[in-house]
Image: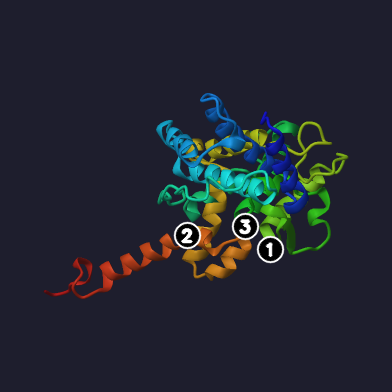
């Protein structure tokens, strides 16, 4: 647990002024704790830290093998923390202001092919071997969840927090509250809507406020429980379960839409990205498609030479 009056004030500010979620607060607290623990080992209080001491902390994170994206996120937290101290008059400077962020890693998102997604969803249909009520319901949950993840591009946190009434009636759209409390409307496919209705029918006897309730109907299905369901679906579909995750379905949604001609700005809105630069990572699909076009059609390319 993060210690220090200044850190507590900073976290309280995030709640009061930015409506930070519990997940965001936990991430910021962990970042502050990482920095304060490093400084404490050197007898330094965070409120008194200097630029070179914070730079040494960042270097230690890198030496420890932490990803550059993680280091950049932690640096962003520390910058905001010291800016807060500056504005509150607790410090006269921001020692983190001049620290350089690590260059981002160029990591393309892993995604499934359209055929693999179809196989995964098809594997979730109830089969004759599903001879218990629990197993049948498990597959209904899997199919409804995967249909929504893939057809609407939801984050797993957004999916599992859907209220039970989210798709009651004839509603072709879902109102999603995403990161930072930002709201967006996303469409629901016909097959996803049908899968959800089948789950409604199965869970009609449950008194739960959640569309995907856990073992205790008063609580939502946990991420860990869903991971087990996804693992089982992957095995049934003949896919490597270690290559499956809710985010892979989200990446697949974005990649397939862009490959079929979707507008990048529309994709940004569907995914709920605050900055379009986050969405632009999916343009690798277009880049790869253009490369194949040139290789196959250009007269000087190997594949485009005919009769020479």
CA gap, disc 3 and disc 2? 17 Å
The vertical placement of 53 against 260, above or below, is above
Q: Which residue is mark 2?
A: 282
Residue 121 seen in the figure: yes
Label at residue 76: none
Image x and y of residue 145, in percent:
67, 47
Query: What secondary structure is marked by label 1?
Result: strand
Q: Which residue is mark 1?
A: 187
The vertical placement of 178 against 142, above or below, is below
CA gap, disc 1 and disc 2? 20 Å
Image x and y of residue 8, in percent:
72, 37
Q: Which residue is mark 3?
A: 151
Report if the CB atoms under discs 1 and 3 are less than 8 Å apart: yes
- Placement of the N terminus among the 4 image quadrants: top right
Image x and y of residue 224, in percent:
64, 33
Question: Residue at the location (63% across, 36% down)?
Answer: 229
- Placement of the C terminus among the 4 image quadrants: bottom left
Callout 1 crowding tier (Cα within 10 Å): few <14, some 14–19, many ≥20:
some
Pointer 3 or 2: first along the chain = 3
Query: What secondary structure is marked by label 2?
Result: helix
CA gap, disc 1 and disc 3? 8 Å
In-image side of 167 versus 49 (left or right): right
Pointer 1 or 2: first along the chain = 1
Query: What secondary structure is marked by label 3?
Result: helix
Residue 232 seen in the figure: no
């Amino acid at each position: 647990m993060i210690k220090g009056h200044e850190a507590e004030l900073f976290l309280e500010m995030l709640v009061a002024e930015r409506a930070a979620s519990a997940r965001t607060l936990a991430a910021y607290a962990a970042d502050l704790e990482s920095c304060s623990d490093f400084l404490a080992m050197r007898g330094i209080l965070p409120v008194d830290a200097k630029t070179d001491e914070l730079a040494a902390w960042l270097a230690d994170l890198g030496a420890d093998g932490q990803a550059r994206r993680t280091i950049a996120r932690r640096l962003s937290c520390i910058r905001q923390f010291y800016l807060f101290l500056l504005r509150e008059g607790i410090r006269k400077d921001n020692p983190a202001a001049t620290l350089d962020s690590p260059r981002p890693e160029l990591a393309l998102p892993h995604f499934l092919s359209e055929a693999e997604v179809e196989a995964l969803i098809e594997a979730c249909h109830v089969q004759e071997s599903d001879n218990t009520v629990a197993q049948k319901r498990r597959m209904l949950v899997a199919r409804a969840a995967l249909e929504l993840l893939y057809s609407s591009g939801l984050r797993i946190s957004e999916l599992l927090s859907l209220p039970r009434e989210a798709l009651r009636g004839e509603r072709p759209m879902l109102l999603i509250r995403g990161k930072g409390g930002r709201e967006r409307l996303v469409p629901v496919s016909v097959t996803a809507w049908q899968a959800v209705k089948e789950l409604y029918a199965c869970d009609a006897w449950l008194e739960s406020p959640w569309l995907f309730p856990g073992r205790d109907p008063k609580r939502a299905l946990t991420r860990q429980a869903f991971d087990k369901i996804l693992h089982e679906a992957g095995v049934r579909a003949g896919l490597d379960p270690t290559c499956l995750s809710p985010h892979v379905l989200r990446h697949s949604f974005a990649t397939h839409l862009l490959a079929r001609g979707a507008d990048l700005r529309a994709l940004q809105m569907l995914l709920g990205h605050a900055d379009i630069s986050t969405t632009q990572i999916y343009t690798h699909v277009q880049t790869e498609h253009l490369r194949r076009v040139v290789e196959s059609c250009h007269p000087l390319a190997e594949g485009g030479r005919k009769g020479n």
